[in-house]
Image (cartoon, helix red, strand yellow):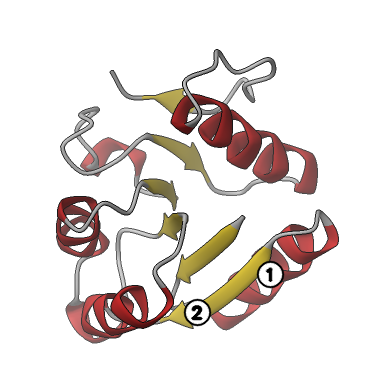
Amino acid sequence: MKILLVEDEVLIAMEQSFYLETAGHEVHGPASTSEKALVLAREVKPDLALVDIHLAQGSSGIDAARQMTAMGIPCLFVTSYREEVEPTREYGVGCLPKPFSQSSLIAAVEAVCAILDGRAPTKVPDTMELFS
């Protein structure tokens, strides 16, 4: 799966990249602002975007996710600010709170893959919320 990281914390982005690439995913980014995320999304056309809420330069991951969702790119929020995300498919498939483990990140991505393929996810991390 081709995944776009929208994350302004370099170490977190490196951790996500490592976990995802180890699981066989193609990772692009990180994009540290919503503007950079949209540029990369248009260039890369990812299958999924993992989006933080608070981005560099005061930009919003929620705004980026709304626009990417409108472009047909599903978004999974990966954030410490879960309470700022309304549980709606308008701009996201779900939310995985930080901190996350390697297994919970991979399981969250696999759950989203299943949903996007029209299947019921077999394993959803306890901390992950799926939006209806």
Numbered badge on residue 17: 1
Quadrant into which the N terminus falls? bottom right
116 relative to 113 in the view: left or right = left
Crowding near pointer 2: few (<14 within 10 Å), some, many (20+)? Answer: many
76 relative to 28 in the view: left or right = left
**Is residue 24 depicted above or below 18 in this figure?**
above
Helix, strand or loop at disc 1? helix
Quadrant into which the C terminus falls? top left
Query: Measuring 69% from the left and 34% from the top, which residue is drawn there?
Result: 107
Compare residues 122 and 100 and report the one nearer the observer. 122
Q: Amino acid at mark 2?
A: Pro
4 relative to 124 in the view: left or right = left
Helix, strand or loop at disc 2? strand
Residue 14 occupies which quadrant of the picture?
Answer: bottom right
Query: Measuring 28% from the left and 36% from the top, which residue is drawn there?
Result: 83
Q: Amino acid at mark 1?
A: Ser
Q: Which residue is mark 2?
A: 30
Residue 101: where, in percent of width, then height? 74, 45
Specify the farthest residue to the right: 22
